[in-house]
Image (cartoon, rainbow, N blue to C red):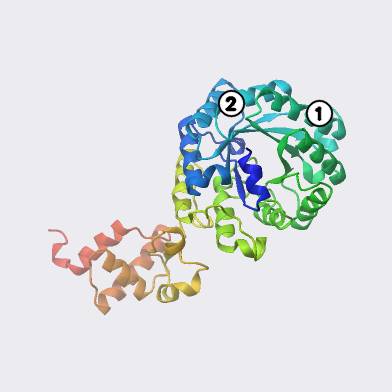
Amino acid sequence: MDLIRQSAQAGRVVLWEESARDGAQAKTLMTPEFRVRLAQETGRVFGADGPRHVVFAAGFPAVCDEEFEAVRKVAAEAEGTVSVAAVCRGALRDVEQAVSSVRGSRHSRVMVVVPASEAMAQVMVHRTAEQALRGGIDLVEAARGLDETVAVDICLADASRADTSLMSHYAQAMTGAGAGLVVLADTVGAQLPGACRDMFAAVGTGTDDDVVLASHLHNDLGLGLANTLQALGAGVRVVSGSWLGIAERAGMVATEQLLFLLARHGQEFLGADAAPWWTAPDLTRLPTIARLVAEETGVPLSVTTPIVGTGVGTISTGTPFVHPQLFQPYDPTQVLGIQPKVLLTQLASARVITAAADRLGHRLDREQTRAAMTWVKTRAFRTGRAVVDDDAFADYLDGLVHPHRVGA
């Protein structure tokens, strides 16, 4: 049974997670052990339904022996928490290797990349687009013949510049040959949202209900998330993402952003009658996973990173401190489990100073509060750093509140 096809055809959303595979093209490298952990943690976002909601692209086995073994390790050890996939080029030898890397793992898959546009077909396989797509049918049949327990998906590279009627015809034919999913990829991240929705709608209209389309949309113009929402609006239910958005060049839609929006606003994007989950995602797991990926890859979480960034749940000015609910679109503590934190900056008000001092065990009177506020602002400008850390502030407060200790 193909759990992923079953989920998509039931209207459930499936995440195709690419941070371990496409993320490598962002010049990152996850160890085999970390890939296993990340697959398991991603699956646990959906509890026992992880294999029905997550396809984890473990890697590209043809890269080298070490990559092959990394994929095998994920397939063996993350089994039961996600559906594990290997990705390969549209060559028989690569397909055989990919199938071998995930063989024996429950609900495993391979995704075969086939060029769909004329330009990409000439570069990748030195053939016309139609010849390349026709060859994709043979690859599906070959993969199914190798191991019928391994699902086979086809990724149509550069779909955004390909003929939609041609893709419809061959998506239908590939599905008839045994393909589980047909992935339409905006390989260069140049597609605009309206064109993206039109592409998925056109290819979907040209196929019957047996064809399950999926998206793989890059973020070179900063439109990966917007385009993915357009694909969902066109009926697609299998969507690619990557933790922190890491992928080739400018990356792709960030998994944490996509899951958050669908969990919080799914019916707005999918329709009032939508039932997108077997088990709804546990959003409180997102910040922890994001930090793990940042530590492993060296891709930093910044103050402006949506959903999981270091600025989420922080307050540094007066009015947001008094009425935080007016200055944030959701409650970070309730939704994500992120505890609010008051940060001292050059914008600090008297209330912020008092709260920070209380946190450090000091109760300040009005004069001390005014003096501390002046010190914080002066220090920020003197050091050229907005945030004044707690240790420095604590040392200052000790001298302010207990001046007799200075020099003792």
* Residue that protrudes farthest toward the bottom in the picture: 366
Is residue 363 visible in the rendered image? The answer is: yes
Give the residue at mark 1.
135
Q: Amino acid at mark 2?
A: Arg
Mark 1 neighbour class, 10 Å CA radius: few under 14, some 14 to 19, many 20 or more? some
Between circles 1 and 2, the one closer to the viewer is 2
Q: Does residue 229 appear left or right of residue 327 in this picture? A: right
Residue 99, picture quadrant:
top right
Vertical position of residue 66 compared to residue 384: above or below: above
Q: Is residue 164 left or right of residue 71?
A: right
- First-in-chain label (1 vs 2): 2
Q: Nearer the viewer, residue 94 or 382?
A: 94
Please state the horizontal and vertical placement of residue 386, each as a whole percent of the image: 43, 61
Q: Residue at x 50, y 53 (%)?
A: 302
- What's the mark number on residue 103? 2
- Calculate the distance from the C-alpha at mark 1 to the C-alpha at mark 2: 23 Å
- Dot 1 falls on a residue whose secondary structure is helix
Q: Quadrant of residue 257?
A: bottom right
Residue 377 position, x and y percent, is 38, 67
Indicate the secondary structure of the residue bearing disc 2. Answer: loop
